[in-house]
Amino acid sequence: MDGVTSIDHIIKLQRVYGEAATTATVVRNILAPVAGLQLDDPDLHRRCVLVKSISTYMDALATFAPFGAVEAVATWSYLGVVVFSSSSAAALALRGLARSPIGHCSAVPSLGLAVAYRFIPWAEIKVQPESAVASSTSATPPEPSRKARALAFREMCERKPMIEYHDPSCPLMLAFPVPPGTQMFLPSRDDSLISGPTMGHDGHLWMHGTLVKYYDMGVEVSEVSVRVRQEQVGSAKIRVTPIEPIVYVPYKDY
């Protein structure tokens, strides 16, 4: 979609509407093609479990079926939503999997918090079992066009411009194995890429994140802040770049 990635949409939703509304919006998008679900049901979220890194429907059944009847599983990218037939089964699964190796299982906030914004094409969503896929004649809303999704994203960007961290000396895509001595700064998605740089007591803007240093026998990871400058790139983006020479300090110690 004009170079806009799924993570761009999610970051933008977080910056404009907050974490709970973003999660509800993503879940509502994922569940949209599931037949028979009333997405406006105020209690639907109580029957759902959001899980990361879900792979196949059979894996989902093997993991979740012991807690109760599974109505459907809808997956998109690395996210999946498991819909139980009862809220008690979902609650039992959340408790039972709290210490499970599957990890990253979480409750779903009320879908009433969701923004009326469809950015996930139905073609990217997989619904199992096949009988749970909504037909073209169902009461579900029509698939938004590429143009409509792009327009909605631009409107959000105009409200709060996208924060883009740009360091020419530190490409985000590194060849593996990474040469020893390489270090890479990854800005915090939940902090810097949402709120933008922070003004320090020294009068400089600082970006918070993680510094990863690669060695022969492994990596060293530390939470740091880096001094940066920012510039407006059109009406939809703020580009942030590190100041030369790059200065890293322990997080919250600037």
Image (cartoon, rainbow, N blue to C red):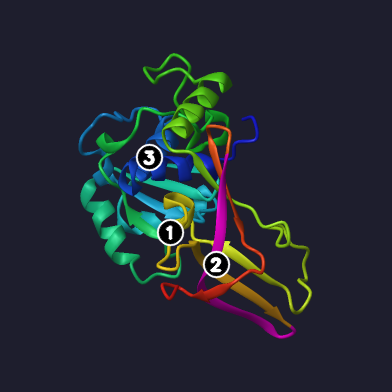
User: Which residue is at 51% across, 25% downward?
Assistant: 149
Residue stretch in magenta: 216-232
Tag 2: amino acid = Val
Residue 131, image x, y percentages: 46, 31
Q: Split into 4 quadrants, where in the image is the C terminus?
A: bottom left
Residue at the extreme bottom: 217
Membership of 100 in magenta stretch: no
Mark 2 highlights which residue?
226
Closer to us: 116 or 8: 8
The quadrant holding residue 111 is top left
Q: Position of residue 74 (x, y in %)?
A: 46, 41
Residue that carries the numbered disc 1 in the rendered image: 198
Please say whether residue 221 is one of the residues in the magenta stretch.
yes
User: In the rendered image, which quarter is residue 67 located in?
Assistant: bottom left
The residue sitting at 44% across, 25% down in the picture is 134
Q: Tell me the CA gap for discs 3 and 2.
A: 25 Å
Q: Which amino acid does the dot numbered 1 rest on?
A: Thr
Q: Is residue 72 visible?
A: no
Q: Secondary structure at mark 2?
A: strand
Q: Which residue is mark 3?
A: 16
> Main structural element of the magenta stretch: helix, strand or loop?
strand
Q: CA distance from mark 1 to mark 2?
A: 10 Å
